Image: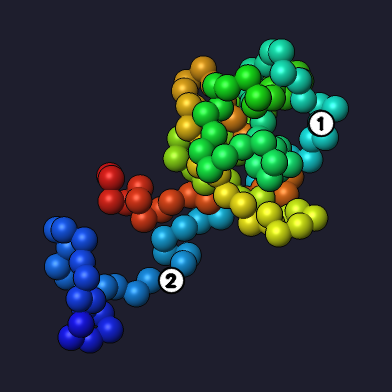
Amino acid sequence: MTDKTMPALRFRGFYDAWEQRKFSEILEYSISNNTLSRANLNYDEGAIKNIHYGDILVKFGSIVDVNQPNVPYVTNGKPSDFTSQLLQNGDVIVADTAEDETTGKAIEVTGITQNVKVWINMHTLQVLMKLLKMILI
């Protein structure tokens, strides 16, 4: 390594120096979520699905396909009520609380379509990958 910005081991195709960035330049956190209890959720039908922080901690692996039957619906929920809070494919959801070392567990959301809308429950943070979106645009 010639200096701290030029590592000796590189990924193929990357030759430039590293660029230091603030976390806020790469990721953006959402604080919009709901306070629904499990009593407001069901597994049978609905217009919008909900990711509960408890499910992040104990039910889901690192990637969740929201089309699976283990992702509940909001009972009587309408997507039009939550347009600013809807998730997108590739969003990362972080559980911000737990009663043990699982606090901070993160999952990536997939399977969202025009017909499948999803939002997050309390004690969750939506992480928007701004840098990745900038690269892909």
Position of residue 57 measured from the top left corner of the image (x, y, whole percent)? 68, 45
- Circle 1 packing at 10 Å, graded few (<14), some (14-19), many (20+), is few
In the rendered view, does 80 fall on the left or right side of 16?
Answer: right
Q: Which residue is drawn at 57% across and 49% down?
A: 106
Considering the numbered disc 2 on the image, is that residue within a helix, a strand or a loop?
A: loop
Q: Can residue 80 be seen in this view?
A: no
Relative horizontal placement of residue 43, taking residue 11 as reference (left or right): right
Vertical relation: 56 (above or below) 38: below
Going by the numbered disc 2, the residue's amino acid type is: Lys
Residue 119 in picture, x, y percent from top left? 62, 34
Kindly indicate whether the residue at mark 1 contacts the one at mark 2 (C-beta within 8 angstroms). no
Q: Which amino acid does label 1 sit on?
A: Arg
Residue, x 69% and y 22% (percent of image)?
73
Secondary structure of residue under mark 1? helix
Q: Quadrant of the C terminus?
A: top left
Numbered mark located on residue 38 in the image: 1
Question: Where is residue 103 drawn, in percent x and y?
Answer: 69, 56
State whether residue 53 is above or below residue 67.
below
Q: Which residue lies furthest to the top in this view?
A: 44
Location of residue 11 (image quadrant): bottom left
Crowd class of label 2 (few under 14; some 14 to 19; many from 20; radius 10 Å): few
Could you tell me which residue is drawn at 56 percent across and 55 percent down? Answer: 29
Residue at image mark 2: 22
Q: In which quarter of the image is the N terminus?
A: bottom left
Q: Give the total of numbered labels.
A: 2
As drawn, the label of residue 11 is none
Residue 19: where, in percent of width, then height?
29, 73
> Among all residues in the image, which is located at the extreme right?
39
Q: How far apart are labels 2 and 1 at the CA level?
A: 37 Å
Question: Mark 2 or 1 closer to N-term?
Answer: 2
Classify residue 37 by image quadrant: top right
Seen from the viewer's position, the closer of residues 26 and 103 is 103
